[in-house]
Image (cartoon, rainbow, N blue to C red):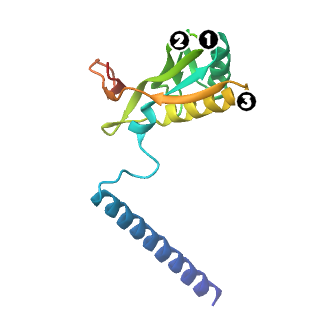
Amino acid sequence: MPSTTFLVGVAVFLVLLWLDQRRRQAAARRRAERGEKPRGGGAEEWLATRLVLETDRDTADAVVAKVAQATMSRPVAPGRWSLLTGFDRYEATAGFVRTDPGAVTLAPLSAPDDDGAPDGAAWLDFRDRVAKAARRSGVVARTEPSPPFVVSTGAAAGRTWVPQK
């Protein structure tokens, strides 16, 4: 008797999972028919933002270096970091693209390809962590639009996405 109850419970659970998946697929299909974008944004939206730190270059370097160390990102040049994108893979890069008096801009410089679209997850994580660390340090952080990303024409092992020039 107890094993029968267990099997019925598992069957009910699986049916509920299947119904929930069908409901989510139907909702996504309705949103697509209305021309809405998927919820939560995609990599294109994540990569379409830069982070402006309203401080001097030395303070910005210190904030970003602290986050880079915590996220196991590797410095590749002054003001440039290679971001961890998978187990021991560093396929995305970020760096300072502009330094104005009183403000430093951090932006994504490259993103790996993910089935024909850029994978912006590493940049999203890095950007959010830098913004949080900046606020903790008393530095104002804001986002601004970034150029769209396009496939790089370089002869690399895999496709790479870079900002459009």
**For the residue labelled by badge 3, is the local secondary structure a helix, a strand or a loop?**
helix
Q: Which residue is mark 2?
A: 99
Residue at position x 62%, y 30% in the image = 131
**For the residue labelled by badge 1, is the local secondary structure a helix, a strand or a loop?**
helix
Mark 3 or mark 1, earlier in chain: 1
Q: Which residue is mark 3?
A: 136
Q: Which residue is mark 1?
A: 57
User: Alpha-carbon distance for marks 3 and 1?
Assistant: 17 Å
The amino acid type, in three-letter code, at marker 3 is: Arg
Mark 3 vs 1: CB contact within 8 A: no
Q: Position of residue 79 (x, y in %)?
A: 55, 12
Mark 2 or mark 3, earlier in chain: 2
Mark 2 vs 3: CB contact within 8 A: no
Label 2 environment density (alpha carbons within 10 Å; few <14, some 14–19, many ≥20): some
Q: Position of residue 69 (x, y in %)?
A: 65, 23
Label 1 environment density (alpha carbons within 10 Å; few <14, some 14–19, many ≥20): some
